[in-house]
Amino acid sequence: MTKAELRQKYKEMRLQLSPGELERLSETIVEMTLTHFQLSEKTISIFLPIERQRELNTYLLWERAMGVGATVAIPKTNFETFEMRHYLFESTDQLEINQKGIPEPKKGKVIAADKFDIVFVPLLAADVKGNRVGYGKGFYDRFLRKCAPNCLFVGLHYFDLEQNIDDVLPTDIRLNAVVMPSQVIRFD
C-alpha cells in the first residue's frame, strides 16, 4: 500500500477505537516502553498527542520518564519552514494548543537535536523494515537527520506492522524500533 492509502486506513482504524480502548492501549504501550528502554538519565523527545487524531496518550510516558530521572523535551512546529525545535518540558502549564491542534510549549529552554538519546516518533503506520508513515509533512524526517548517530528513533503504534510501504523515499528516516501493545520490534 502507498503512504496515502495507509494514512487513510489507520486513521479509520483509530476512529474505531473507543476512548477506553485508546487509554488501555496507551497504558500498555507506555509499560512496554518502560520495560524495553532505559530512560533514566537519558535526554528524550516525546511528542504530545493530537486529540482529534486519537494519538497515543504520551502524557503518561512523560510522567513516567520524569519519575525515573529522564530529561524530557517536546517539539514545537514551524509550519512556514517545516522545522521543529524542542523545548525542555517540565509542566503542562508551558503548553498551548497550536492551530493544528498540537499541544506545544509556549516557551522554555531549547534542547539541540544532537543532545537526544531517544526520540519517540509519532506515526500512523510502520512496516517490518522500520519505515513509517506520518502525516506527510516531513517534520520528523528533517528533525531526525539532525540527531546524533547513536540516538534511537522509536515509534509508538497501536497496531501491527505492515509488510511493506510501497512509496518509501530516500529522504525517509527509518525507525530503530516500534513499540506496540503486544511486542517491541527492533530493526537494527
Image (cartoon, rainbow, N blue to C red):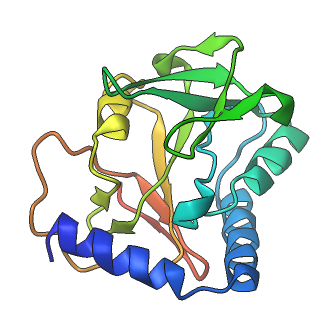
In the displayed structure, does residue 6 sit left or right of residue 156? left
- Residue 72 at x, y percent in the picture: 71, 32
- The residue at 69%/54% (across/down) is 58
Residue 180 in percent (x, y) is at 55, 73
Residue 46 against residue 36 in the figure, above or below: above
Q: Is residue 52 left or right of residue 63?
A: left
Residue placed at 45% from the left, 45% from the top? 153
Q: Residue at x 85, y 30 (%)?
A: 93
Image quarter of residue 82: top left
Residue 166 pos. (x, y %): 10, 69
Task: Specify the quadrant that holds the C terminus.
Answer: bottom left
In front: 27, or 92?
Answer: 92
Q: Residue furthest right?
A: 67
Report the residue at 36% width, 60% height from top: 187
Determine if residue 161 is in view: no
Front-most of 41 and 10?
10
Residue 107 visible in this rendered orientation of the protein? yes
Residue in the foreground of this view, choosing between 21 and 157: 21
Q: Position of residue 1 (x, y in %)?
A: 15, 77
**Side (left or right) of 19 relative to 181:** right
Counting labels gives 0
Q: Residue furthest top?
A: 109
Query: Foreground: 22 or 175?
Result: 22
